[in-house]
Image: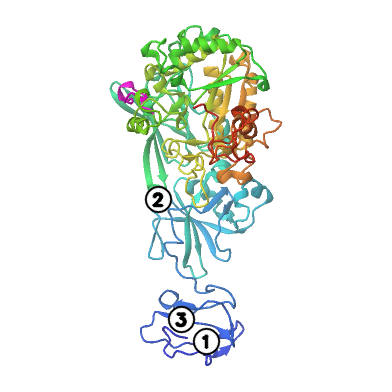
Amino acid sequence: MWGGAAEPTDWASPLPPVRADGFGAVFEVPLAEGAKSLSYIIHKGDDKDLPADQSLDVSASGHEVWRLAGTEGLVLPVPAATAADADLGKARAHWIDRDTVAWQAEPSLRHSLAFSDRGGIAYENGDLTGDLRLIRLVPGTLSEEQRRRWPHLAAYPALKVDPRDADLVRDALRGQVVAVARDAAGTLVAATGVQIPGVLDDLYAKAATATLGPSGQVVPRLALWAPTARKVELALYGSTGRTIHRMRRDDESGVWSVRGLPTWLGREYTYLVTVYSPKAGEVVTNEVTDPYSLDVTPDGERSRLVSLDAAAYRPPGWDRLAKPAAVPQDRASIYELHVRDFSASDATVPAALRGTYAAFQHDGAGLRELRALAADGLTHVHLLPAFDFATVPERAADRTEPSCDLAALPPDSEQQQECVARTAAKDSFNWGYDPLHYTVPEGSYATRPGERIKEFRGMVAGLNRAGLRVVMDVVYNHTHSTDVLDPIVPGYYHRLLDDGTVATSTCCANTAPEHLMMGKLVVDSVVTWAKQYKIDGFRFDLMGHHPKANLLAVRRALDELTLADDGVDGKSIILYGEGWNFGEVADGARFEQATQANLAGTGIGTFTDRLRDAVRGGTPFDADPRVQGFGSGLAGAPNGSPPTAPPSNSGPAWRTTPT
């Protein structure tokens, strides 16, 4: 003993136990005056109980401690929680259904879920504070079905909701929830936030069949899924300002709805969602757009209530549109292009129409070339993302284009990049892989944002008349930020890592289509594009971040569309995407993924990096750009570069986009 002992001892003359009882040896150690710690080694001859020197914090542990031989840490007392193990800013516990919480907490402790209607649970001075109630948890095990559904949690200890507290579950989910572990004496050992998507899907499965967003051609109805909200109201905007309308909650589905008047059509609206926000640490009222929006104001600031069947949104001949003959997916010949770039520099298109949907209805050089390609066998045009995205100002007056003459600069100069970088945040160019509203056409591609619906349909009609079917590039695997979805049901729509932080392996905030209602949003959005915009195919960005089950649900929903009932032959619509395998979902870590191998035989296509690399040469990640393939001269003009590396099926962000 040393460092705090009143009478330090050496190795040869250790302090012996004063006695032994039914539990083991008892040592009594006199402390020096004012000692706050004690350094010691328990040993028998030259054999140490633990290899490292030990230190006891007397001020935290008190003057009686219990240890197990050969085991780190104390049995009793368990030290009070510190900020490190009581971090309520994290969410390390997973409430996977109404009965089960998976949490890597010490099973021998006492566990509960603390919840507060108003929020405000906090950690101070070794314990939780705030107006809280408890749901008791008892030890349990994960079933085989639970381990299958939650493979990344399969090794977690399971805790079961005490049946006596089962009636508190719905109330708890509409406030702040904290997982709590205490020792037998009631001392707080650990506390953390709770991830709730699993229990929401279990309790509110009825919502999967609900009609969400705007509906009704004459008498509009609006519906929003917000099961954790304490209140939801509709804010309706008009020439006289804003009016607030109460929405009614269905307790079985968690859907809030309101039925309006025909005069509501054409007006702007938002939802006022009063909900506990883990980010804010309190109950807040968020004003949000509708995730099922069919139209929005410029830059997506508010939703606009529309009926897509209204004559004002249909270009001439839309109801009689004749499509080119469908071809099987394996016979499709697809050309990828960018809506803006198709005509942005085309002098044969009127200046006011360049870079817009309307250019596809004008007989310019670009459209004539597409007609020629169609005559030569091209079957589809694949449009890069054309849904509402976040990074291009939608009003032309708000955009600033590069002012320098790029062509006049030396070809090996860095000045071109410097020039475009100065206006990159406000110019008209972006690939569009930054979704804002999934089921609204992008407004910067319209001659005016308010014409986006009619002009998008006109583009589809123009391409169909040119002999081409239309594929839409869709990006349901992430959003530009969490600002549209998360304020409605905090912690639900985006995939969370084990500690509750949002996964960003796709570049931005990853969505979680493995959750019931995010998966439903994907299916409902695709069906809307197919029915209302007569889209002929969908290319899924980073499809491997979707469950295979989600893509199969999309396929089934499309197959149910018929010309007689829906004006669309859903079975002729093609599906394909990037089946890459990477990130937090890699190798089936969370679900069976929509990747290359897993989709074999489903009729849903995936890009093949093997064919790409063989034609192009090398891989997207080769340091040497000279590596050749069939298309770059390997057979007839080898350049002596190293041989092509073995193909990889894990490219995280490679797109087959022409540059």
- Contact? badges 1 and 3 (CB < 8 Å): no
Residue bearing mark 3? 39
Give the prevailing secondary structure in the magenta stretch.
loop
Residue bearing mark 1? 27
- Let me know if residue 394 appears in the view: yes
249 vs 461, nearest the viewer: 461
Q: Residue at x 36, y 13 (%)?
A: 352
The residue mark sitting in front, 1 or 2, is: 1
Q: Residue furthest bottom?
A: 13
How dense is the environment of label 2, judged by Cα within 10 Å: few (below 14), some, or many (20 and up)? many
**Earlier residue among tags 1 and 3:** 1
The residue mark sitting in front, 3 or 2, is: 3
Up/down of 41 relative to 502, above or below: below
x and y percentages locating residue 174 in the rendered image: 46, 45
x and y percentages locating residue 5 in the rendered image: 43, 86
Amino acid carrying mark 1 in the image: Phe
